[in-house]
Structure formats: C-alpha cells, structure tokens
C-alpha cells in the first residue's frame, strides 16, 4: 500500500483561516476567550513588582502627539566566556562588547485600539575570540509590530502581528512570534488561543536568516487560586513544516504565586509526545521550587528548587527524552530585582535527560538592588554522551551520570532613575561524566541600560 501523502496548508491559507476565526469570534454570542496577558504587569513601589528584564521593550512615556508616544533605551553589554571546551590547554576564550539601541512607538487613538512597534539595532564587537569564529553583523530587527483590539466584545480582545510570547518563568516561551491571538477575561478566569510562527516575515531587515518553519497552536486556561496565586493548564502543538519533520504536542500545567506572605512558589509540569523523523517521542518534565523571604532588614531569602526531564538510554525505537518547546529561555528571578538563567549561567541547559537541584540565597541591600548566590547540581537521568542545547562545547562520556556543579553570583542595581545594571559571575565544575582532566568553565557578564 502506498504511503498516504500528507497535505500541508500554506501560510497564507492558515492566516486566512485565522482571520475568519477572529471574525466569527468577535461577532458570535459570548464565548470564552481571555485577555489574561494583554496588559503587561505594571511596576509599583511594592517589592513584589520590582523586577527588571533586559529583554522588555522600552516604555512609551514620551509624547509626540496626543495619541502617539515613544520610548528608547541604550544598552551596553560585556560578556566573557572562558574554557567552555573544559580544556585549559586550548585557547577558546571569547570576550565581546555589544551596544544596542531600542526604540518603541505606540499609537493609542482610542481605549480599544493600540498599534505598537519595537525596533532594535545592535552589533557584537569581539575583544578576544577563538580562531575560526564567524564575523558578526550589524542587525536591525523588527522585534514587535502588532495591532491590539481591546474589549471589542465583552471580555474579548485580539492581537494581530509580531508580538511577545512570554510566560512567568520563560519555561515555555520567550520569543517574538508572528501571530493571531485571542484573549478572554472574566473576573478571575481567562482563556487564550493563538496561532503563530517565528519569522513568518523576516525579523532582521539587514540580513537574511534561515528559520525553521514551525506552526504553533497554543491554548491556555488561567484561573486564580485565592488572591495571590494562579494555575494555568495549557496545550501547545508544534507542527514542523521543514524536512526534519519534528511534530510535538505539549500538555502541561503551571502554577505560581504565594503559599504564605513569606513564601513564593512555582510548579511546572509537562508531558511531550509526537514524532521526530518517524521516531515516537514520549517524555515528561517538571520544575518545582519555593523562595522563603525573611521579614527583616535586607530581606534575606532562601530558595530551593528541583527540575527533572526524562531521559532514554536507547532512543532508537521510542525516544523518552523530554525536551522543552524550543521557544524557552529559562530566565527568572527569586527575590532579587533582576532575572538570570535559573538552570545555570554557564551550562544553561535545556531540561532534557537531566536532574537539576538548585539552592540559592539572596539579600536586598536596598529596595532596588539585590545580590543572589545560586548553586546547581547536575545529573543525567540516563547516562548519555550527548547534552541537549547547552552552552559548553564538550560532551560527557556516556558512562557516568554525574555532570557536575554550577555556582552563580548575580548582582542587580536600579536605584538611579532611568539606569539599570546587572553583573553576573558564573562557573561550571565538571563532574565524573567528563574526562579526569576536564577543567572549570567561567562566565562574566555586565550590562547597563539607559532609558529615555
């Protein structure tokens, strides 16, 4: 029997279906979509909202006209990576300086309408680099460009265009996607649905870049758990339309909030299934933890967390390795004012065939500054000579499961109005899964941003 041919709709057809769906939603009787994330969380003097994310667009607080506002920010970043091949005898050190200019414009002629654009100009300049590294190009990117229709039907909003997808801990998303997105909010309950693709239209105006053609179909429910917590079940379908043909379905649940006035928590769980070039995929992963903040001067805090992604020592017939969505960034904060890579600044792994134990301690020297010291222990679920999407360049031996330990120091400072800064120092000490002469890898990063 001949194999059944799989027919794939073209992007234009998919977009037309989306627009028809939006029209039906807007003019149908009451339906249950939510605007749980249309408005970004505003910052206040309450410590619970004092955080900083260098990836957020500039605030558009400066008026050009009554309805047209803009904001801009300039960022200077320095990164130094040492010994990422875990070999002291080779010279692979990388030091770079990266200036960045970001400009955002917002047009708000009515309470129900907003048009927004965010442009980003940057280039990475090498100070020290290994031989053979490709030269870096100047990039001018259209990070966001969307139209938002608010409350066009009771409780219903819609956003069309390139927009930011980001969950609380960036465990699922931290990406700007071309999307059609519908929200519904009703009191403490909300729903969200979207169809998206990364760079349906080229993001970089100056350079051509190849991007996998993957359609994302995302459905999210959100409900409050008391006054300070929420729980969100979700379904994400990733339909790969390239030759690699990795089609994945993620079914999961997340919850964040407060257990008590002194304890913040997070819970993430996901099951992934699908196929990759004909191999069945079945895996699961979770990430749980809590931060306890002492109600005394300097707000000392303690954090404990555990993350697990299933592995497979023989994935040829069925692959039980968990994998994240490919759109994640694994970036958040504990009780500090700035976020960081919570699986380790040096190893920075995708949660796949891994167990990660995390312990952290932090203080607030002032209301808008923080210091965090974070430890990580890494161990494979099944011994393998591969690591999925890590920053180091060396592979384990596939015999021992102990990968090693990481330690990060994160300093955040934002006491000066319009100025935000962070400094990060990280190391990864390889364990028994690497050769006996494998040496420590280091990372140093500084970033300063000026907003105007």
Image: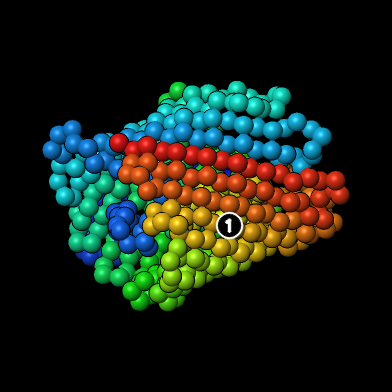
Q: Secondary structure at mark 1?
A: strand
* Whole-percent x, y for residue 76 in the image: 46, 33
Seen at 51% across and 55% down, the residue is 371
Judging depth in this view, the residue of 298 and 380 nearest the camera is: 298
Seen at 62% across and 31% down, the residue is 95
Residue 150 in view, yes or no: yes
Q: Is residue 333 left or right of residue 152?
A: right
The quarter of the image holding the C terminus is: top left
Judging depth in this view, the residue of 129 and 191 nearest the camera is: 129
* Whole-percent x, y for residue 72 in the image: 32, 35
Seen at 37% across and 48% down, the residue is 415
Tell me which corner region of the image, top left, top right, bottom left or bottom right, holds residue 270: bottom right
* Whole-percent x, y for residue 256 in the image: 45, 67
Q: Is residue 94 above or below residue 151?
A: above
Tell me which corner region of the image, top left, top right, bottom left or bottom right, holds residue 86: top right
Seen at 26% across and 70% down, the residue is 187
From the image, tell me which residue sits under label 1: 373
| Count of residue discs | 1
Judging depth in this view, the residue of 436 and 293 nearest the camera is: 293
Query: Mark 1 packing: few (<14 Cα in 10 Å), some, or many (20+)?
Result: some
How is the model colour-coded?
A: rainbow
Residue 11 in view, yes or no: no
Q: Is residue 294 above or below residue 215?
A: below
Q: Is residue 86 above or below residue 234?
A: above
* Whole-percent x, y for residue 220 in the image: 41, 62
């Amino acid at each position: 029997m001949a194999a059944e041919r799989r027919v794939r709709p073209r992007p234009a057809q998919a977009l037309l279906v989306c627009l028809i769906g939006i029209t039906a939603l807007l003019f149908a009787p009451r339906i249950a979509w939510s605007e749980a994330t249309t408005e970004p969380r505003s910052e206040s003097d309450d410590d619970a909202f004092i955080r900083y994310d260098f990836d957020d667009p500039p605030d558009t607080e400066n008026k050009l006209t009554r309805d047209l506002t803009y904001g801009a920010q300039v960022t200077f970043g320095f990164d130094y990576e040492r010994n990422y091949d875990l070999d002291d005898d080779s010279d692979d050190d990388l030091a770079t300086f990266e200036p960045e200019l970001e400009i955002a414009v917002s047009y708000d002629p009515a309470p129900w309408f907003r048009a927004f654009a965010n442009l980003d100009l940057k280039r990475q300049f090498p100070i020290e680099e290994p031989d053979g590294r490709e030269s870096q190009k100047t990039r001018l990117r259209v990070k966001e460009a969307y139209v938002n229709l608010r409350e066009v039907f009771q409780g219903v909003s819609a956003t069309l265009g390139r927009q930011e997808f980001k969950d609380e801990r960036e465990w699922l998303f931290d990406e700007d996607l071309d999307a059609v997105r519908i929200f519904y909010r009703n009191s403490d309950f909300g729903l969200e649905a979207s169809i998206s693709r990364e760079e349906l239209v080229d993001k970089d105006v100056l350079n051509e870049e190849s991007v996998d053609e993957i359609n994302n179909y995302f459905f999210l429910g959100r409900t409050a758990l008391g006054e300070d917590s929420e729980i969100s079940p979700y379904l994400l379908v990733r339909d790969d339309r390239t030759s690699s043909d990795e089609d994945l379905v993620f079914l999961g649940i997340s919850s964040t909030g407060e257990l008590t006035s002194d304890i913040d928590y997070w819970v993430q769980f996901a099951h992934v299934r699908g196929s990759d070039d004909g191999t069945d995929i079945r895996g699961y992963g979770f990430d749980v933890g809590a931060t306890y903040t002492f109600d005394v001067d300097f707000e000392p805090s303690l954090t404990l967390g555990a993350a697990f992604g299933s592995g497979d020592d023989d994935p040829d017939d069925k692959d039980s390795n968990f994998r994240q969505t490919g759109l994640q960034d694994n970036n958040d904060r504990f009780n500090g004012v700035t976020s960081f890579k919570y699986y380790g600044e040096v190893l920075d792994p995708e949660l796949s065939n891994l167990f990660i134990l995390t312990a952290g301690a932090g203080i607030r020297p002032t209301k808008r500054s923080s210091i965090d010291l974070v430890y990580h222990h890494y161990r494979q679920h099944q011994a393998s000579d591969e690591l999925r999407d890590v920053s180091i360049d060396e592979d384990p031996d596939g015999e021992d499961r102990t990968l090693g330990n990481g330690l990060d120091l994160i300093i955040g400072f934002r006491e000066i109005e319009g100025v935000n800064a962070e400094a990060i120092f990280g190391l990864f000490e390889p364990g028994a899964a690497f050769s006996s002469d494998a040496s420590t890898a280091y990372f140093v990063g500084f970033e300063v941003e000026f907003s105007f």
